[in-house]
């Protein structure tokens, strides 16, 4: 991260780009500098090879809430993806993320947290639940468990499907394994139950209902878990996203939860507000600026 921060933030001066058509000068070469990074893992003496964009450092998202993932997010992330099925679990994780960020010298609200959300919606609750049942009928629990095995690097086919799954260290996605082993003190998940759950819900929260019902549940998560938005899973391609945009978004806009116009020009401004195209002062990338 030190290497890319130095390239993005420190290689080109803010006024390096001249764009002088008459003199046929694109950039002042004296204002494009070598970063001369010589570290434990990398030697990068050269320059950033293209003109930087208005954000300089791209808006940084991180996924994973293992101990290592949390520490990395607290230092570097601006948006964080989490994946937990219940609001109480998400609340505890968000609290830990924000506390770790504060300990790292960043205001905790600088981490914008987005839980994974599977949304099955229709004009009425009854229609939404009928759609959900249809999705389940056409899903394969065995395939879902095979995908989960690939994610956590544990072969579920070799385990007793009705014995509670225990956490073990692996080189897979530890946060995904923790969701069904350590994160929920109220439940012991078996491989069969995990397969059944994953048929529609993709490890995150499941919201089924009319636009008003889904919006109520979203508001509950925002208020109780202190999340900043949601990462919508594309459960059924060509259906999930159009349903959400056409049905749920207008209800959220009516409640003042979703904007109707973009106020900023960059992605980072959508997180932090107009005028915040560059990383905020407390972010480590900002320390690599050289004017």
Image (tube, rainbow, N blue to C red):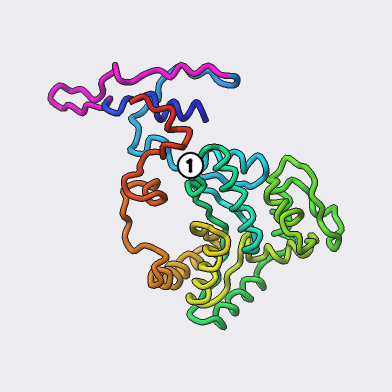
> Circle 1 — which element?
loop
Q: In this view, does 211 lie above or below 260?
A: below
Position of residue 13 measured from the top left corner of the image (x, y, whole percent)? 32, 25
User: Does residue 203 appear anywhere in the picture?
Assistant: no
- Give the camera-side residue of 157 and 164: 164
- Give the camera-side residue of 112 and 235: 112
Q: How crowded is mark 1: few (under 14 residues within 10 Å), some or many (20 or more)?
A: few
Q: Is residue 213 above or below residue 143?
A: below
* Residue at 45 percent of width and 71 percent of height: 248
User: Does residue 33 appear anywhere in the picture?
Assistant: yes
Q: In this view, does 160 lie to the left or right of 227?
A: right
Residue 17 falls inside the magenta stretch: yes
Q: What is the quadrant of residue 206 in the picture?
A: bottom right
Magenta span covers which residues? 16-39
* Residue at 78 percent of width and 42 percent of height: 169
Residue 21 falls inside the magenta stretch: yes
* Residue at 52 percent of width and 37 percent of height: 105
Residue identifier under label 1:
60
Instruction: State the quadrant of the C terminus.
Output: top left
Q: Is residue 178 left or right of residue 106?
A: right
Position of residue 133 measured from the top left corner of the image (x, y, whole percent)? 64, 76
Q: Is residue 59 left or right of residue 176?
A: left
Position of residue 236 measured from the top left corner of the image (x, y, whole percent)? 55, 65
* Residue at 16 percent of width and 27 percent of height: 21
Q: In this view, does 279 lie above or below 108?
A: above
- Give the camera-side residue of 46 and 264: 264
Q: In this view, does 38 lie above or below 65?
A: above
Position of residue 17 measured from the top left corner of the image (x, y, whole percent)? 26, 27
Report the number of discs: 1
């Amino acid at each position: 991260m030190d290497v890319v921060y130095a390239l993005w933030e420190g290689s080109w001066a803010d006024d390096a780009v001249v764009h002088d058509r008459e003199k046929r000068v694109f950039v002042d070469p004296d204002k494009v500098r070598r970063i001369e990074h010589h570290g434990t893992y990398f030697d990068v003496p050269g320059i950033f090879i293209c003109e930087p964009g208005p954000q300089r450092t791209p808006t940084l998202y991180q996924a994973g809430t293992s101990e290592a993932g949390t520490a990395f997010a607290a230092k570097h992330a601006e948006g964080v993806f989490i994946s937990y099925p219940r609001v109480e679990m998400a609340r505890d994780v968000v609290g830990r993320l924000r506390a770790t960020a504060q300990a790292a010298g960043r205001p905790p609200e600088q981490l914008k947290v987005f839980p994974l959300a599977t949304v099955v919606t229709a004009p009425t609750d009854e229609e939404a639940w009928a759609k959900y049942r249809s999705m389940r009928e056409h899903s394969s629990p065995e395939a879902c468990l095979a995908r989960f095995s690939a994610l956590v690097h544990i072969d579920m086919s070799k385990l007793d499907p009705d014995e509670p799954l225990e956490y073990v260290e692996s080189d897979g996605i530890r946060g995904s394994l923790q969701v069904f082993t350590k994160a929920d003190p109220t439940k012991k998940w078996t491989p069969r139950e995990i397969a059944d759950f994953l048929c529609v819900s993709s490890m995150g929260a499941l919201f089924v209902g009319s636009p008003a019902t889904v919006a109520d549940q979203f508001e509950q998560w925002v208020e109780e878990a202190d999340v900043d938005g949601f990462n919508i899973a594309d459960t059924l391609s060509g259906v999930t996203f159009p349903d959400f945009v056409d049905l749920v978004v207008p209800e959220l806009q009516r409640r003042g939860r979703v904007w109707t116009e973009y106020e900023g020009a960059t992605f980072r401004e959508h997180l932090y507000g107009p005028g915040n195209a560059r990383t905020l002062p407390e972010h480590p990338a900002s320390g690599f600026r050289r004017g």
